[in-house]
Amino acid sequence: MHWLYLGVAIFFETIGTTALKASDGMTRAGPALVVVLAYALSFWLLALVLRVIPVGVAYAIWSGLGICFIAMIGWSVFGQRLDLPALLGLGLIIAGILVINLFSNTVGH
């Protein structure tokens, strides 16, 4: 169940960060409210995950996948460019998450 919680926490973190961009510096009430609620849910779920998964591993996965999802949303929704170094960096983040999940004994499978 903790992996499901982590996935949903990443989802809400991604929603919150997308709304943060849409809030225009927290000057638009609707997106600003989404920011607060999404981050609250994300951190609450992450806190539940930390009961089972070590903090460094959980945070690496949570933040790493969040970065990759936000980069893709920035590109597709907000028209932000991703050049080759950015894409390589995102690939390294994903590779790091895969290494942790596939080869580390610190992750409870």
Image: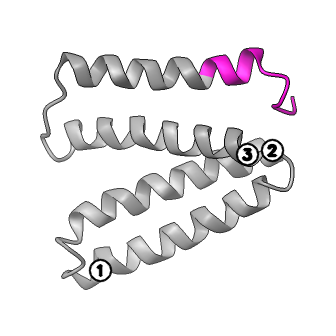
Query: Of callouts 3 and 2, which one flags the residue occurring earlier in the amino acid sequence?
Result: 3
Q: Position of residue 82 (x, y in %)?
A: 19, 28
Of tags 3 and 2, the one toward the viewer is 2
Q: Residue at 27% of width from left, 85% of height from top?
A: 29
Query: Of callouts 1 and 3, which one flags the residue occurring earlier in the amino acid sequence?
Result: 3
Kindly identify the amino acid type of the residue bearing the numbered disc 2.
Ile
Q: Position of residue 94 (x, y in %)?
A: 50, 23
Q: Residue at 29% of width from left, 80% of height from top?
A: 30
> Marks 1/2: CA distance?
34 Å
Q: Disc 1 designates what residue?
A: 30
**Is disc 1 placed on a helix, strand or loop?**
helix
Of tags 1 and 2, the one toward the viewer is 2
**Is disc 2 placed on a helix, strand or loop?**
loop
Q: Decide whether residue 100 is among the magenta residues.
A: yes
Q: Which residues are magenta?
A: 98-109
Q: Nearer the viewer, residue 29 or 47?
A: 47
| Residue 109 found in image quarter | top right
Q: Which mark identifies residue 53?
A: 2
Q: Disc 3 designates what residue?
A: 4
| Residue 86 found in image quarter | top left
Q: Residue at 41% of width from left, 18% of height from top?
A: 91
Q: Residue at 68% of width from left, 48% of height from top?
A: 6
